[in-house]
Image: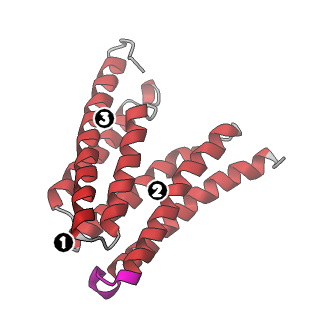
Amino acid sequence: MVPRARVANLANMLTGVRMVLVPVFLVALFVGDGHETTWRITAFAIFAVAVITDHFDGALARSYGMVTEFGTLADPIADKALIGSALVGLSLLGDLAWWVTAVILIRELGVTVLRLVVLRRGVIPASRGGKIKTLVQAVAIGLFILPLSDGWLTAAWVIMLTAVVLTVTTGVDYFVSAVRDWRGRPTDR
């Protein structure tokens, strides 16, 4: 059995790895003006590893009861940095419409600000819908990173549009829950 302190450090190290992978991912994404097949596949692999660390850092911290202040603060920052940099990078390359990037980033910023505002009354935990949204976003972004044929791009767009709908829907849900919490009413969570 791994000592608890070491597991906590491992969870935080995974969050740190995700933060370090963000600029590495961006470099790989932009090599050769962003359209070299080998580098796009490399960027995808880096993005996939970073997304996987997001699952494992939280699971380790929760499973071993080692949620730390650093992890609580750094994990969402690392998540937003990864997703945000991927969306902006893809839009800069012309592979993703800017409106998609704007909708997702505005929602993420809004929910982050909302969480900070209601922090005194308690933490707003990630909802099941929020977790599904994150997964669908990651799959959609991953597909846009890969150098795909036109047929696959259609599938990527369907998944991305699903991610946008989930992003907006869960954002509204978080807002409604926060307002209920702020007013002292019970929420459905």
Which numbered tag is attached to residue 78? 2
Q: Is residue 87 visible?
A: yes
Circle 2 SS class: helix
Q: Please give the label number shown on residue 68.
A: none
Depth check: 87 or 6 in front?
87
- Where is residue 145? Give x, y as percent: 34, 68
Q: Quadrant of the C terminus?
A: top left
Magenta range = 31-38
Residue 90, how many percent across, how many down?
27, 68
Residue that badge 1 annotates:
94
Residue type at tag 1: Gly
Q: Are marks 1 and 2 in contact (CB under 8 Å)?
A: no
Q: Is residue 181 above or below residue 103?
A: above
Tell me if I can see residue 127 in this picture: no
Q: Is residue 125 above or below residue 165?
A: above
* Amino acid type at image mark 2: Ala
The residue type indicated by label 3 comes to Thr
Marks 3/1: CA distance?
27 Å
Name the residue rendered at 61%, 43% in the picture.
59
Q: CA distance from mark 1 to mark 2?
A: 24 Å
Q: Between residue 62 and residue 156, name the one nearer to us.
A: 156
Extreme residue in the right direction: 1
Query: Residue 36 lies in magenta, yes or no?
Result: yes
In depth, the one of 170 and 70 nearer the eye is 170
Of marks 1 and 2, which one's residue comes earlier in the chain? 2
Q: Quadrant of residue 130?
A: top left
Q: Earlier in the sequence, mark 2 or mark 3?
A: 2
Crowding at mark 3 (Cα within 10 Å: few <14, some 14-19, many 20+): many
